[in-house]
């Protein structure tokens, strides 16, 4: 039952899933780190990215256009959401922020369900990346390999923005101490808006990239959101490297457990999270003090 | 708010539950809908204690709802268990046990971490129910054939099978549930729950083991969820697997927020709104699947604009209508209270000896003497920064010690180490002959050492009296006790202690004022009162005069003098005039070290102190 090609193929599946989770979690974690808001609508953002891409694809037939349109649409949605709703919740308790983003998430899912029904939609991968690739010892779907590469590039881009630009410096400083950044004369509200947009875009981008791998339904973001939480708890809230590490760990745990029995994937994931919480309550790469 | 005439709420609930079968059908409610509302309401009672009262927002209650439901359903359908009520209770116990284990993990963190962990846990329960345990739970088919309760009374047998007949059973369950919940909320434990919601840091500092109390709230919520889950099976004659889904948890959260958190009845009202809107939108308006969108929008709007939900809004409205009068009374009261305050202050000075505290040791021959607190070589290092270095410090029983020092001298760090809020890098602290180095702030407070904070740390959502009750409870009950069904008023010595503290800090005129409506000076005095109410044998005050006007300072110094009768105190402040007037001995800290120690006169005339403050300019400090 366990043979090497099968195992390696699951390792690759885990890598692809892990890379996606890393990207989505990065979005969630930089939003939380900078704004102090945990966005429970993040899974819905992921789902909307897929649907926006699907619409763009069905009009143009181009996967690249779908990716660009999906990402930009979700970014715009994030910016609007921040300006209209989230902004009024910065000074309210965490619980209220959780409630309102949870409610918005449900509204988003139901709006999509209203427009597209619960039936699943299909976005095919671009022709160039269809079919399978031989890795010498096993054949693997080309698009899934490509997902790893595409997401790695996206994460690299996010890294550059976070660590090599002025905005990134402000964001990272804001994660450490947003009051201080504010008092240095930087308009944190504008930064918050941009960060929310970028974080949402990360989820939307992941949503459209993931669309050819799974079938697209309005509920596609729900499970992803739960997995993202585990990733963030494992990696450490507010930590970009932690999100990547946590994403890869979670992806591999889910894939490898699924090889034996898919029913236990979440149990193992949960066990890993518990282990981290016991040994390092602040996550593998998280720092103490942020709660 | 929930304290009014005794048993008023219980009586009204009973009347409401008895009247419901006669009134609700006229409003178009089907019995089955009403029964579902009751099950959700019961489920929500525990959740409201957890979320509304303790401030812990869990998105994982479905785990316990499902656990209780499936254990009860399994016992009744597969194991041939005859007694429905007993099966429900066993299901509840199983859910509570699961809640205890999960709570141990989830409560390692607070805030959003807690929310995320509970989501993940609930999802795991769902998958476990579906796969590894599907032989017992029926997997995606659930467990059909759950019987309804019947009771053999000897002469006759009562059957509660469906509709309004089953309603009687469910209403009885709900009534027992609300009576228990009300007792819990009115118990000392309930008071500490709201303290945790408002200010966990201070709840810890006044000597409560908040982790144990949070776990208690979590287990209570799990128990309610488990029982309600069992009732769901009874109600539907079938235990559905979707009880375990995230949607269940989400619906509970939304119903509670719609109805009003922290009201106990909120979840019931929320469920009524939810289920009737769902019926109305689906059946009458033919909206099909869009009903959930409408409810989602309603929910978002309520969270944005009506924080305390429908019940909270009604309570506020009632307050607004009846309280036109109340508000006026409030303003006049405030005016009167200012005069009162002055009179009380005068009275306090006039009858100073009368204010000798009950619980502290007076300066009497035979009272303990010698050192109460000894710190040796106390050092605190933050990375490269040396905040305190090698401090030796001794305070004797009955002493009133002042600590002064320029900003950044390490005074507050020193206090934090003494109360064990931070642990020293090296050195030891001995309090009443016992080494307390490395103990928790809660334990140290229980031993009789606590402090008032430089920046107010009050329970902002509660009244003055409730604040003091919470602090006084720790001295009377210890760090943790499970007296869930005891009335707060029944604790011997509590009222006396609270009244006495109110007198000491001169707040007798405003016991029922919410903290948020207090003036700054009053808040400052309450801050000292919180520390006093734990009845410490050594009281530390971190800048009690900070931010006060000159007039308030004079009053507060007078207050501190009367408090200090027969008490051991250490006071940090920048107001040297005040400190020199109060303290018997003064310690001067500079750059994390003890510069000098002596009587106020010695300090005033000490040239190194003058240098430290005035930078070498020789002159006499303001006398």
Image (cartoon, coloured by chain):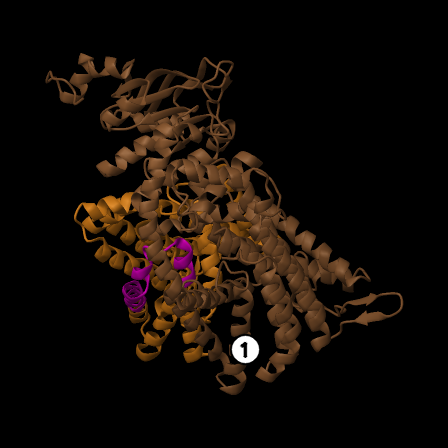
Residue B602 image point, x, y percent = 24, 12
Tally of numbered discs: 1
Disc 1 chain ID: B
* Position in image of residue B166 (x %, y %): 72, 72
Quarter of the rendering containing residue A288: top left
B453 versus B338 height, above or below: above
Residue B41 at least partly seen: yes
Q: Nearer the viewer, residue B155 or B417?
A: B155
Q: Position of residue B593 (x, y in %)?
A: 28, 18
Q: What hue represents chain B?
A: brown
Please state if B94 lies on the left or on the right of B187 as rendered.
right
Q: Is B444 contained in the magenta span?
A: no
The residue indicated by pointer 1 is: B276
Tell me: B549 left or right of B616. right
Dot 1: few (<14), some (14–19), or many (≥20) neighbours within 10 Å? some
**Residue for point 40% across, 57% down:** A20
Shown colour of chain A? orange
Reply yes or no: does residue A82 show up in magenta: yes
Looking at the image, which residue sits at the far left?
B617
Magenta part, dominant SS: helix
Which segment is the magenta one?
A71-100
**Looking at this view, is B47 or B293 the one in front?**
B47
Question: Which quadrant is the C terminus of chain B positioned in?
Answer: top left
Say if A17 sits above or below B201 in the image: below
Q: Is residue B361 above or below residue A231?
A: above
Along the line of sight, which residue is nearer the eye, B577 or B81? B577
User: Can residue B547 be spotted in the picture?
Assistant: no
Q: Position of residue B392 (x, y in %)?
A: 36, 14
Horizontal relation, residue B550 to residue B569: left or right:
left
Q: Is residue A158 above or below residue B154?
A: above
Residue B92 falls in which quadrant of the image? bottom right
**Of the pair B11 and B378, the residue shown nearer to us:** B11
């Amino acid at each position: 039952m366990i043979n090497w090609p099968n195992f390696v193929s699951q390792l690759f599946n885990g890598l692809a899933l892990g890379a996606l989770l890393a990207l989505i979690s990065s979005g969630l974690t930089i939003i939380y780190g900078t704004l102090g808001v945990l966005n429970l609508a993040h899974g819905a953002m992921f789902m909307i990215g897929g649907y926006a891409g699907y619409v763009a694809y069905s009009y143009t037939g181009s996967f690249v256009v779908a990716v660009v349109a999906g990402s930009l649409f979700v970014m715009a949605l994030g910016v609007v959401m921040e300006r209209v709703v989230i902004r009024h919740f910065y000074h309210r308790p965490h619980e209220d922020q959780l409630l309102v983003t949870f409610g918005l998430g449900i509204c988003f899912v139901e709006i999509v369900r209203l427009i597209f029904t619960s039936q699943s939609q299909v976005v095919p991968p671009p022709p160039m990346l269809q079919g399978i690739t031989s890795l010498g010892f096993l054949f693997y779907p080309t698009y899934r390999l490509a997902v790893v590469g595409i997401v790695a590039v996206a994460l690299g881009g996010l890294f550059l923005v976070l660590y090599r630009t002025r905005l990134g410096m402000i964001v990272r400083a804001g994660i450490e101490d947003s009051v201080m950044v504010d008092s240095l004369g930087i308009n944190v509200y504008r930064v918050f808006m941009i960060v929310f947009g970028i974080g949402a875009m990360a989820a939307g981008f992941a949503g459209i990239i993931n669309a050819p791998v799974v079938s697209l339904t309005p509920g596609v973001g729900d499970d992803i959101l739960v997995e993202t939480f585990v990733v963030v708890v494992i990696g450490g809230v507010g930590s970009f490297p932690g999100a990547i590490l946590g994403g890869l760990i979670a992806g591999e745990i889910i894939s490898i457990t699924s090889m034996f029995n898919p029913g236990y994937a979440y149990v193992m994931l949960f066990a890993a999270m518990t282990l981290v919480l016991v040994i390092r309550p602040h996550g593998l790469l998280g720092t103490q003090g942020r709660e | 708010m929930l304290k009014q005439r005794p048993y008023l709420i219980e009586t009204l609930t009973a009347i409401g539950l008895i009247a419901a079968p006669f009134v609700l059908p006229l409003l178009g409610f089907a019995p089955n809908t009403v029964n579902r509302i009751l099950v959700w309401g019961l489920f929500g009672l525990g959740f409201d204690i957890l979320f509304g009262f303790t401030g812990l927002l869990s998105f994982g209650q479905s785990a316990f709802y499902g656990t209780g439901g499936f254990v009860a359903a399994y016992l009744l359908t597969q194991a041939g268990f005859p007694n429905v009520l007993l099966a429900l209770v066993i299901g509840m116990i199983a859910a509570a046990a699961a809640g205890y284990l999960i709570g141990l993990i989830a409560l390692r963190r607070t805030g959003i971490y807690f929310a995320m962990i509970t989501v993940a846990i609930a999802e795991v329960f769902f998958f476990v129910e579906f796969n590894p345990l599907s032989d017992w739970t029926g997997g995606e088919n659930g467990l059909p054939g759950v019987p309804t309760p019947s009771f053999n009374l000897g002469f006759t047998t009562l059957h509660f099978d469906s509709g309004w007949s089953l309603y009687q059973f469910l209403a009885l369950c709900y009534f027992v549930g609300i009576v228990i919940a009300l007792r819990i909320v009115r118990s000392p434990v309930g008071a500490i729950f709201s303290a945790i919601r408002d200010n966990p840091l201070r709840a810890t500092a006044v000597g409560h083991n908040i982790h144990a109390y949070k776990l208690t709230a979590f287990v209570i919520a799990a128990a309610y969820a488990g029982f309600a889950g069992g009732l769901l099976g009874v109600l539907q004659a079938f235990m559905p697997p979707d009880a375990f889904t995230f949607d269940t948890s989400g619906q509970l959260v939304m119903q509670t927020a719609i109805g009003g958190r922290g009201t106990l009845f909120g979840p019931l009202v929320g469920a009524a709104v939810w289920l009737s809107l769902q019926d109305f939108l689906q059946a009458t308006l033919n909206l099909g699947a869009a009903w959930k969108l409408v409810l989602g929008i309603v929910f978002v709007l309520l969270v944005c604009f009506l924080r305390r939900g429908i019940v909270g809004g009604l309570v506020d409205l009632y307050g607004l209508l009846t309280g036109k009068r109340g508000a006026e009374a409030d303003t006049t009261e405030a005016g009167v209270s200012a005069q009162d305050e002055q009179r009380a202050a005068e009275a306090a000075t006039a009858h100073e000896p009368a204010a000798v505290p009950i619980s502290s040791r007076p300066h009497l021959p035979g009272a303990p003497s010698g050192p109460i607190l000894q710190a040796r070589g106390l050092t605190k290092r933050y990375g490269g920064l040396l905040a305190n270095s090698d401090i030796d410090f001794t305070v004797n029983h009955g002493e009133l010690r002042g600590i002064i020092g320029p900003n950044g001298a390490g005074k507050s760090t020193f206090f934090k180490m003494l109360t064990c809020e931070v642990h020293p890098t090296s050195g030891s602290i001995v309090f009443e002959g016992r080494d307390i180095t490395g103990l928790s702030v809660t334990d140290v407070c229980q031993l009789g050492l606590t402090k008032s904070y430089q920046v107010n740390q009050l329970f902002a959502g509660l009244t003055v009296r409730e604040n003091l009750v919470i602090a006084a409870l720790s001295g009377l009950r210890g760090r943790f006790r499970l007296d869930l069904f005891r009335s707060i008023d029944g604790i011997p010595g509590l009222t006396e202690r609270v009244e006495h503290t109110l007198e000491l800090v001169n707040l007798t005129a405003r016991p029922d004022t919410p903290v948020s409506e207090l003036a700054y000076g009053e808040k400052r005095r309450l801050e000292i009162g919180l520390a006093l109410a734990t009845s410490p044998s050594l009281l530390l005050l971190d800048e009690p005069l900070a931010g006060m006007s000159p007039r308030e300072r004079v009053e507060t110094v007078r207050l501190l003098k009367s408090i200090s009768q027969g008490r051991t105190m250490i006071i940090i402040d920048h107001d040297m005039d005040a400190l020199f007037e109060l303290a018997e001995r003064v310690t001067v800290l500079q750059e994390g070290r003890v510069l000098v120690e002596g009587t106020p006169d010695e300090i005033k005339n000490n040239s190194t102190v003058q240098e430290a403050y005035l930078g070498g300019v020789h002159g006499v400090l303001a006398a």
